[in-house]
Image: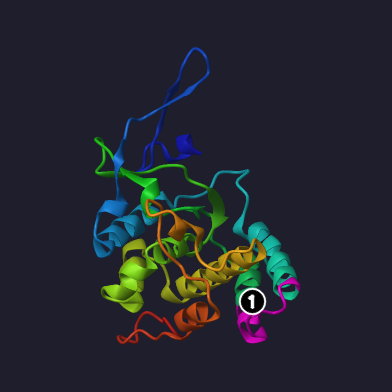
Amino acid sequence: MLAVWDGRRCTPARSRSAAGALLLERLDAQRSLRDLPVGAAIVIAGRLLRRLAIPAPTGVRTLTDHAADMDRLLRARWAQLGRPFGRRLLDAVLETARSAKHSQERLLVNWDLHYENVLAGEREPWLVIDPKVVAGDPAFGLAQLLWTRLEEIEDGSGVDHVFQLLVEAAEIDPISARAWTILRLVDYWLWALSVGFTEDPALRDPGGPASLTLDPGQVGEIRSRRCACRRCGWGG
């Protein structure tokens, strides 16, 4: 997959050694987007996501297939965990998952894009490492950029403002961005409850990424927000 991007703001595959090892570009592991203020970091990350959203090659798993699996898994976990939130929210995220089959988007989406996976480089100021991809709507790749620094965002300019910065930088439809972000938040929430977590495990590691507290009010609060500018569609 690195070869497909050919160094387009992602660590490129330079060559292979005689032993078959993949040789990559050297980056500064001590400098990531985590070191920048969240407002600046999220704009850089959004632009990177857009730049990497190129037509997917044959053989990449589609978001349609991935979303179909999520549909089944979300439904099962919700029931197994005693219906930890209302049916209305579950139905909303399942509808988003099913909508993938109607999308014509077949772009590479790095769904594991977060601040610590963007390192400082020499050829480019910032480069993405360790991408995990599906072929589909780039809006599927936004969620971690919001939840991994959520406390900073809420303590600063707020979720609405940072969400608007992100969708504008990534050139993504805000309605689609909102829907896929809520789906991924709910997916993460149910997974965490299924393994016994009540908060983001990264909070237990001060050096790790922050910080989605997984209580029932959090997703509901995010779902109910409405941007003051009335343009971005947040809160619907």
Question: Residue sitting at 63 percent across and 64 percent down?
Answer: 196
Where does the image place residue 12, in percent across and percent down from the top left? 40, 34
Left or right: 224 in relation to 134: left
In this view, the residue in front, 144 or 233, is: 144
Q: Residue furthest top?
A: 18
Tell me: 60 left or right of 1: right
Asked if residue 112 shows in the view, the reply is yes
Asked if residue 151 lies in the magenta stretch, the reply is: no
Q: Considering only vertical position in the picture, is 172 above or below 84?
A: above
- Residue 91 within the magenta-colored segment of the rendering: yes
Position of residue 114 measured from the top left corner of the image (x, y, whole percent): 41, 54
| Mark 1 secondary-structure assignment | helix
Q: Residues within 10 Å of mark 1 (few under 14, many from 20)?
A: some
Q: Residue at x 35, y 75 (%)?
A: 159
The reply to whether residue 106 is in sight is no
Question: Residue at the location (41% across, 36% down)?
Answer: 6
- 199 in relation to 51, above or below: below
Q: Position of residue 73 (x, y in %)?
A: 71, 65
| In the depicted structure, whether residue 133 falls above or below residue 94 | above
Q: Hey, what amino acid is under mark 1? A: Glu
Front residue of 85/230: it is 85
Residue at the spot of label 1: 95
Q: Which residues are magenta?
A: 80-92
Q: Position of residue 122 (x, y in %)?
A: 24, 35
